[in-house]
Amino acid sequence: MFISFLKTKLRFFSITICFLAGTAGIFSVQITEESTRRTMEAGHEFIKYIDICVTNFGSKEDIDKFHKANEHYYNAALLNLRNQYSEAYQELNKSLEILKYLYSDILQKKYLEDAKKILDKTAIAILYSNDIQAKYYLKLGYRNYELARQLQVQGYNFNKYLFSQKIKYFIQGIESARLAKKYAILALIESNISIFEKDEYRKRSFDETYAKQEIEKISNFEKVENDLRNLIFKKLINNDNQLFLHHYDNYKIYFKDKESAIKESAKRLKSKNTADNSKQPNNQTPAKPQKTPAAKPNQTKPNK
């Protein structure tokens, strides 16, 4: 009885091992030129996207992480040109792993926390006001903040080895947090503009109403920036939360005189390559010139 039970268990384990051995080839990743190219394109987009985030809000530690990720991507590009796809794929994974942590930290510590601060401060200012439009903007802001927070949790809890998928969740979270800050700034502006300055309540003359006027071409970015400057100039709001910095980042623009993190990383890589080239010994030593014996003058013996 015991022997038959043991044989049944052994047969079961042998079938399981054969099944796993057969399916190992199916689930294994085959590194080819095409798979490396797709991963490099995704890595390039991830580095390009977070460049503005790190430039505007990143600390020195964030910039160092960004540089390490960019350096691994640079090494992968060189290996890919040499047709060393396996080594290039490994460097790309190192780059994506660093970017995964960088995206998570930036989203949590910069975007979510700052969006919550701006929304809460705006809510206190318009809580007892009768401005329906400002309250509507505020509701939209909190809705997008909650969506960004959920996306951050989903990305954090996703499979830790699928770097690209986790980063995509974090990118969606950053977009939602930016939208939340946009609505918070719009609510702040709407609640502080007097009713006579709003377009829907402003008095218009007959010519303005019926004549065809040339519409002044001004972007939403410029309009919001002008409104913020006017409100700060009138001392209706203060710039405690660095509203202009958040406003620039909401539209994916580098703030003022800040240098791009990609440019700074390129300078580091260039200086490192120059230092590495200078350290390499020069194996080709110049040949020493051979001394040619001087020609002796012809000495003719005098005739006796």
Image (spheres, rainbow, N blue to C red):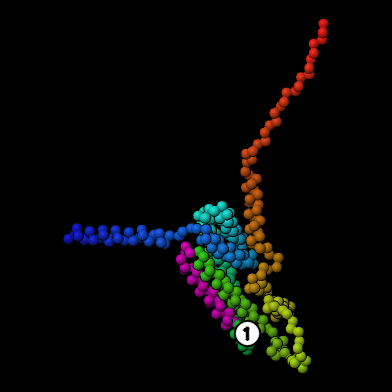
Q: In which image quadrant can residue 250 be found? A: bottom right
| Quarter placement of the C terminus | top right
What residue is shown at x 26% (from left), y 59% (from top)?
Answer: 11
The local secondary structure at tag 1 comes to helix
Compare residues 271 and 301 and report the one nearer the observer: 301
What residue is shown at x 57% (from left), y 58% (from top)?
Answer: 73
Compare residues 162 and 33 and report the one nearer the observer: 33
Mark 1, residues whose alpha carbon is within 10 Å: few (<14), some, or many (≥20)? many
For mark 1, what is the residue? 134
Point out residue 27 in the picture as x, y percentages from the top left corner: 42, 62
Whether residue 113 is visible to the viewer of this picture, yes or no, is: no
Residue 232 drawn above or below residue 87: below
Q: In which image quadrant can residue 28 be found? A: bottom left
Q: Residue furthest top?
A: 304
Give the residues in magenta: 138-162
Point out residue 267 in the picture as x, y percentages from the top left corner: 66, 56
- The tally of labels here is 1
What residue is shown at x 64% (from left), y 78% (from top)?
Answer: 185
Question: Which secondary structure is most common in the magenta stretch?
Answer: helix
Point out residue 138 in the picture as x, y percentages from the top left corner: 59, 82
